[in-house]
Amino acid sequence: MLRFANSYLLHLLWLIPLALIFYYFAFRAKSRALQRFGSSELMKKLAANASPTRQILKAALILLALLFALLALARPQIGTRIEEVKREGIDIMIAIDVSTSMMAEDVQPSRLEKAKHEVESLLNRLQGDRVGLIAFSGTAFVQCPLTLDYGAAKLFLDILDPGLIPTPGTNLGQAISRALEAFDQQERKHKVLVIITDGEDHEGDVMKQAEEAERQGVIIYTVGIGSPKGDPIPVMTDYGVSAGFKKDREGQVVITKLDEVTLEKIALQTNGKYFRATSGEEELRKIYDDVDKLEKKELGSMRFSQFEDRFQYLLIIAIALLAAEIFVPERRQRRDFWLKRLFKW
């Protein structure tokens, strides 16, 4: 696959036809000047060694050199190739609650948007650790497998929304289970799970999964999004227009509350910590500091390398054409030129 890194510079190729027009009028003006200087027979004798063909050749070499120089300036690139990247770090799975309760606005602009911003900030802090994403509500699935490519993880993060998983509810146990499956089953360390949620578990088996995580050596950090006093859940139409708040079967507005007790129990079970999300995101620094102190391992991950530059070859061709133009004389050498010089000595 070929592309130009500085594609906007390709507009400079319009210099080629402009230079061609310039040479045309320059040669034409030169011819008219010679005609005014004297008769055609006289000029043929005076300029017997002049070679119009060589002059055109020199102009063509300059134009070709300009063409290749401009193409080199646009930085042609060829790629991509897959390479393995190895670093020292640990495996971190981040589980994000995308249930409808995360649309509550007791945290601006919403719990979910705050959670996504927290994850992005954490990704910006990581260095050398593999990271993966899990989206969960009534069920859970791996949104992004473990990778060293933080840019790719951010792309998967951007598309998280409540409509991603059709199953309603909040199943924290399922989120932990999916994370355990994503980790290397042969290891009993180097594994961290960060859960960002409002903590309202609707299934009730989350502590069993937390115990299993402890047995597998996974440390869980939980981050609570929202307020304990609760907030109603906005209902939006397909056109993004507010349609009031979610109601139960009795017609009462549903209030979603932050369940800090459950999140604290999960963290304590696995020797992790619980934090409530703050505007200053101090909890992220604390999580990162804790993770950075853990024993690290050598991690390998496949990723696409950057496009490889190929402008060097075009630049070499441009230089070679300019060198050839210098060594091409404008005048023909007479056949006896070298013989006369030889016998002169």
Image (spheres, grey):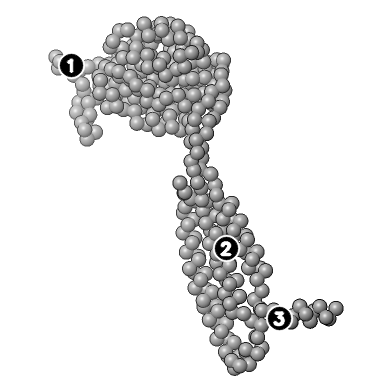
Residue ID at (46%, 12%):
218
Q: Residue at x 31, y 14 (%)?
A: 171
Estimate the x, y position of residue 23 in percent, counting from the top left: 54, 74
Q: Residue at x 52, y 69 (%)?
A: 19
Q: Percent x, y for residue 162?
A: 29, 25
Among the two numbered marks 3 and 2 on one chain, the one whose residue lies closer to the N terminus? 2
Count neighbours of disc 3 (C-alpha within 10 A) and say few if under 14, some if 14 to 19, many if 20 or more. few
The amino acid sitting under disc 3 is Arg
Residue tagged 1:
248
- Dot 2 alpha-carbon crowd within 10 angstroms: few under 14, some 14 to 19, many 20 or more: many
Q: Which residue is mark 3?
A: 335
Give the CA separation, mark 1 to mark 3.
Answer: 105 Å
Q: Which mark is first along the chain, 2 or 1? A: 2
Residue denoted by label 2: 65
* Residue 230 location (% of width, % of height): 29, 16
User: In the visual, does 52 lie left or right of 207?
Assistant: right
Callout 3 touching callout 2 (CB < 8 Å): no
